[in-house]
Image (cartoon, rainbow, N blue to C red):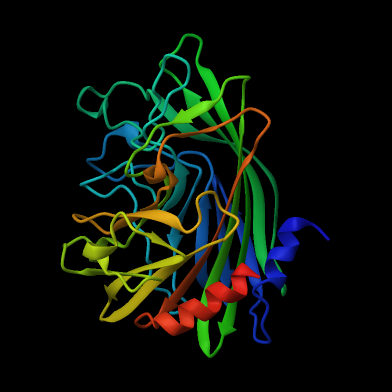
């Protein structure tokens, strides 16, 4: 049995829905019973009118939906057009003499419409699948530093993603499992100095853009304000969409580096980051892959801490 098929067993239940996968150009769309679950943007997608083309980006999940069909992620928002659904990237880095920023893709050059100094780029889709046991895909990304001549490959990354819809202890839930494996593309490390964000990013729905419209809750009982720069086993982000509450719980696997991992809970927009660099200087070294595992529970209704904790304990097994 492959590692990604095992993902389904760790979240198994008696009421799982068939997952359909539909390739549509540069997008893989997953659905359950005709209702969208999530999409994987492979190559860079189009930008909305008025958004600089420099912010075209791929290698991320968006849109992501609750079981009722509410979209709980945002993309190309006016305040941070480089934030992109669910993604993985590093911000403050050292690679030789260079300092590529893979998080704020295009931010520095946007006013002049220049080129990307650094980016995370989709490379290839190894496989995708759907069916009664769930759906998923395996893909490859590369972290590129364009500030050097010739451009430099910094990291290679593999995403193993499993998608399912299940009833977990009475709650209908869309479940996305992500395993990111990052390896050095050269014999040089990617050094990651202490910084307050960079790692796993989640941008919430545009309905939550007003600062009072979004809520956050961590495994330690913290809200958005008190939870920033704390560590946690899980974190929930959510709010009202079309008159009802929906959100995403991010479960952090205990084998992850610096678990329980530090959080950046943005005070100005509906965005959070699981940010291991908050814990101090570190590096991704040649020959030592960085494996990061996360489970996303997308559900309708307000968060129940006891229920999320029970799901985290099951995941942690």
Q: Nearer the viewer, residue 241 or 201?
A: 201
Whole-percent x, y for residue 42 in the image: 54, 44
**Which of the 4 image quarters holds residue 20?**
bottom right
Relative to 292, 299 lies left or right: left
**Rendered residue at 63%/19% (across/down):** 187
Q: Is residue 198 visible?
A: no
Q: Quadrant of the C terminus?
A: bottom right
**Rendered residue at 31%/47% (across/down):** 76
Relative to 131, 44 lies left or right: left
Q: Is residue 19 visible?
A: yes
Query: What is the residue that sits farthest to the top in this orientation?
Result: 149
Instruction: Report the number of numbered marks.
Output: 0
Q: Vertical placement of 166 versus 224: above or below?
A: below
Query: What is the residue that sits farthest to the right in this orientation?
Result: 1
Relative to 145, 182 lies left or right: right
Whole-percent x, y for residue 1 in the image: 83, 61
Q: Vertical placement of 201 versus 191: above or below?
A: below
Whole-percent x, y for residue 114 in the image: 30, 21
**Rendered residue at 65%/80% (across/down):** 16
Query: What is the residue that sits farthest to the bottom in this orientation?
Result: 170
Query: What is the residue that sits farthest to the front in this orientation?
Result: 280
Whole-percent x, y for residue 103 in the image: 38, 38
Q: Nearer the viewer, residue 49 or 194?
A: 194
**Rendered residue at 50%/86% (across/down):** 171
Q: Nearer the viewer, residue 181 or 110?
A: 181
């Amino acid at each position: 049995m492959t590692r990604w098929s095992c993902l389904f067993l760790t979240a198994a239940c008696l009421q799982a829905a068939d997952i359909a996968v539909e390739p549509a150009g540069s997008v893989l769309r997953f659905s359950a019973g005709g209702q969208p679950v999530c999409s994987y943007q492979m190559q860079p997608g189009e930008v909305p009118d008025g958004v600089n083309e420099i912010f075209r980006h791929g290698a991320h999940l968006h849109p992501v939906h609750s079981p009722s069909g509410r979209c709980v992620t945002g993309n190309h928002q006016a305040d941070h057009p480089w934030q992109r659904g669910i993604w993985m990237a590093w911000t403050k880095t050292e690679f030789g003499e260079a300092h590529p920023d893979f998080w704020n893709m295009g931010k520095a050059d946007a006013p002049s419409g220049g080129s990307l100094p650094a980016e995370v780029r989709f490379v290839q889709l190894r496989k995708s699948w759907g069916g009664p046991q769930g759906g998923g895909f395996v893909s490859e990304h590369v972290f590129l530093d364009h500030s050097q001549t010739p451009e430099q490959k910094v990291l290679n990354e593999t995403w193993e993603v499993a998608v399912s819809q299940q009833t977990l202890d009475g709650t209908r839930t869309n479940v996305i499992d992500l395993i990111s494996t990052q390896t050095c593309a050269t014999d040089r490390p990617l050094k990651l100095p202490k910084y307050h964000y960079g790692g796993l990013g989640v941008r919430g729905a545009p309905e939550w853009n007003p600062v009072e419209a979004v809520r956050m809750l961590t495994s330690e009982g913290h809200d958005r304000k008190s939870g920033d720069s704390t560590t946690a086993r899980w974190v929930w982000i959510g709010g009202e969409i079309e008159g009802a509450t929906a959100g995403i719980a991010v479960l952090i696997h205990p084998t992850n580096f610096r678990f329980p991992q530090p959080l950046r809970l943005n005070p100005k927009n509906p965005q959070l980051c699981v940010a291991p660099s908050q814990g101090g200087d570190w590096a991704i070294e040649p020959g030592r892959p960085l494996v990061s595992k996360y489970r996303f529970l997308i559900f309708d209704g307000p968060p129940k801490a006891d229920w999320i904790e029970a799901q985290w304990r099951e995941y942690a097994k």
